[in-house]
Image (spheres, grey):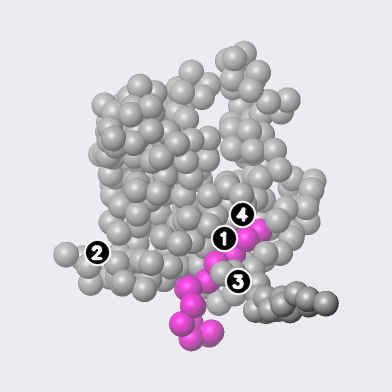
Amino acid sequence: MCMGRATAAAPESVPLVIGESWFIDSAALGEKRRINVYRPAGLPADMPLPVIYMPDGGLAEDFLHIAGLLQVGTANMTTRPFILVGIENTERRRDLTGPTDVAKDRSIAPRVGGSKAFRGFIRNELMPEVAKRYRVTNERAIIGESLAGLFVVETLVQEPDLFDTYIALDPSLWWDGGKLLTQAADKHLAFSGKKDVYIGSSADGQSFINQSKLAATFGPIKNLNYHYENWPAETHATIYQPAALKAFRMLLAPTSKAAE
């Protein structure tokens, strides 16, 4: 009787871990939210680090590729090490939009206009929890694309001292008939400390961006280091990675390079 060969056992596998996830019960939002965190490897555990917050921060959203950019930047010393805090979505269009008088805007989701509550969640609940769990400095950044980019710019206008660095890629500044920049101009924004903002737009997004109005709104502000860049070879679907890499190298560079 011919006996078949014994099948070799597959090598044992282990989970591939790049960070950690935890949940926070939010009173501001009335729900539990999942938070994904990446901390650069190879650094002393007690070394305080600045933090970059990102909406659209789920594992199936933008968390992994932004964590990869920060990991590479830390390794090759083109960016300073940052802790990445990704906020996973539940009702994205609710959280990332402000109020609107435009009926077409209100048709995109059952609920919109919740950005103030979402910002309160970040300020009053998430940031203190991050500070309890990790050793952090006082430096904070935020990055977002599309509606998340709108939220980044809105936060710069409404609560500029919440972050030090603002990165908005293809921001949906068409929201509410484009009133956000008018509100910004009316506020006569002034900052007590230095702020950095980078706004990038793809070939798709440029038709929704009034570059002259952006420059007139943010360019003259004292203590605001304003950068705008066109990415004509990129689409709305492809701008995030290349533009984020450029912004990180420009605004999150090691101190010696940033001063050059």
Q: Are marks 1 and 2 in contact (CB under 8 Å)?
A: no
Q: Amino acid at mark 3?
A: Val
Observer-side mark, 1 or 2, equals 1
Q: Amino acid at mark 1?
A: Val
Q: Earlier in the sequence, mark 1 or mark 2?
A: 1
Q: CA distance from mark 1 to mark 2?
A: 23 Å
Look at the numbered disc 3 and give the secondary structure of its residue.
loop
Quarter of the image for residue 245 reads bottom left
Q: Are marks 3 and 1 in contact (CB under 8 Å)?
A: no
Pointer 2 local density, CA inside 10 Å: few below 14, some 14–19, many at least 20:
few
Which residue ends up furthest to the left in the rendered image? 260
Pointer 3 local density, CA inside 10 Å: few below 14, some 14–19, many at least 20:
few
Q: In this figure, which residue is indicated by the disc labeled 2?
A: 258
Q: CA distance from mark 4 to mark 3?
A: 12 Å
Which numbered circle lies on residue 85? 1
Residue 11, image x and y in percent? 65, 79
Q: Earlier in the sequence, mark 3 or mark 2?
A: 3
Which residue ends up furthest to the top in the rendered image? 103
The segment highlighted magenta reads 35-50
Q: In this figure, which residue is indicated by the disc labeled 4?
A: 59
Observer-side mark, 1 or 4, equals 4
Q: Amino acid at mark 2?
A: Ala
Quadrant of the snapshot with the C terminus? bottom left
> What predominant SS class does the magenta segment belong to?
loop
